Image (cartoon, coloured by chain):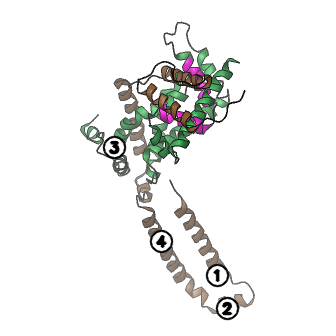
Chain colours: A brown, B green
Amino acid sequence: MTRNAPTPQEDAWLADFTDSILDGEADSPPESASNAEELALAESLLRLKRAFPQQELDPSLVKRMRHQVMEVARQEKRRKPRWTDIFQWNLPLSQRQQAGLAFAMLVLAGLTLVSAPLLFSNESALTAAAGTNLPGAVIGLGLVALLAVLFLILRRKS
Amino acid sequence: MNSNASIYNRSTVSDEHLIQRFKQGDLDSFGSLYERHLPTVYNRVRYVIPEADVEDVTQEVFISAMKSLNAFRGESLFTTWLRALTNFKVAEYYRKKNRKQTPREAPIAEAETLSDESADLHLEDRIALRRALMSMPERYREVILLRFSEGLQFDQIAKSMNSNLETTKSLFRRAVAALRKNLDDKHD
C-alpha cells in the first residue's frame, strides 16, 4: 500500500531525530515513530551514524599530509614564472571592467593613429571606388575582434 | 609549523584574508587554510570514497585548490568553492575508476580487498552505505553529507542550498528514504 506524501510534521520529526542522534542524545530506534516507515528511516540514520562515527584526525596524519601539500605548493611556486604575476589582477569586477575599458580605449587610439594615413590617402579612395576598401575592413574587423575578446574576458567568473 | 601559520589559524583571521596573502606569495597562508579546512574535506571524502583512497583524494582537492586559488574571486564563500571542488574530485575519481568498474561496483571491489580478520565491525556497513550514497541523486547525497559529514544544522543547510527550512527537511526525508531504498536493493 502506498502512503500519502509525508506531512511537514513528519519531515520535522525526522530532522529532530537526526539532530538528537548527532548530538549523542539518541542511539536506538525511537519509540515515538508513528509507523513502520518512520522506524525504517530512523534505523537508516542510526546505521549511518554508527558506520561513520565522528572522529578527530590524528595530528601526525595532519602533519604528514600538510607537509606533502606544502611541498607541492613550493614546487609550484618555483615553477611559475614571475611575469605571470602581471596577469594576477586581484581587483573587484567593476575595477577590472574599468581597466578593460581603459585598455580598449588605448588600443582604439593606437589603431586610429596607425590607420589615419591610410584612411585619408588617395590610394584608399581609389580602392574604395573599386569596391575593396581594405584598410577600413581590416580596422572594422579588428574592432569587432577586440570587442569580442573584451566581452569574453569581462564575463568570466570564478 | 611556523609561528605565522599558528597565528593565521586563529578564527579571527578570515579565509579571504588568508587567500589574499597567499595570492601575494605567502605560502604559509595556504598552510593555514589547509589546516582549517582539512577535517571538513577529509570527512566528506571518507563518506563517499573507499578507505584506501580517502587520503589521496583529499590531497588532490587541496592541491587543485592551491593551483586555482589565484582564479578565485571571492564571489562565493571559500567553503562553498572548496565543497564544489571536493565534489568535482570525487566525481573525477569515479570517472577514472569507471573505466574499470561502475561507482556501484567500486565499494564491492573495496570489500574484496578486506582481510577476514578485519577488526572494524562497521567496515562492511560503511562500504554498503558508500555504495548507497553514490547511487542516489546528487541533491539527496548533498543534503545528507551536509548534515552528517559537515555537521551543518538544518537552517544552515537551507541557507547553503538557497532554500527554506521546511523544504530542506522535506528534501532530507526524501534523501533518507532513497538511502534506505538503495540499502534494501543491495540485499535483493
Residue A97 visible here: yes
Instruction: Tell me the amino acid under the disc marked 2.
Output: Ala
Instruction: Tell me the amino acid under the disc marked 1.
Output: Pro
- Residues at discs 4 and 3 in contact (Cβ within 8 Å): no
Q: CA distance from mark 2 to mark 4?
A: 31 Å
Q: Badge 2 is on which residue? A: A125
- Residues at discs 3 and 2 in contact (Cβ within 8 Å): no
Instruction: Tell me the amino acid under the disc marked 4.
Output: Phe
Image coordinates of residue B106 in percent, x first then y, are 62, 24
- Asked whether residue B38 is drawn in magenta, I would say no
In this rendering, position of residue B94 left or right of residue B57? right
Q: Chain of mark 2?
A: A
Image coordinates of residue B73 in percent, x first then y, are 45, 54
* Label 4: few (<14), some (14–19) or many (≥20) C-alpha neighbours in 10 Å: few
**Residue ID at (38%, 51%):** B23
Q: Badge 3 is on which residue? A: B29
SS category of the residue bearing label 3: helix
* Badge 2 and badge 4 both on one subunit: yes
* Label 3: few (<14), some (14–19) or many (≥20) C-alpha neighbours in 10 Å: many
Instruction: Tell me the amino acid under the disc marked 3.
Output: Ser
Numbered mark located on residue A135 in the image: 1
Q: In the displayed image of the protein, which residue is found farthest to the left? A: B3
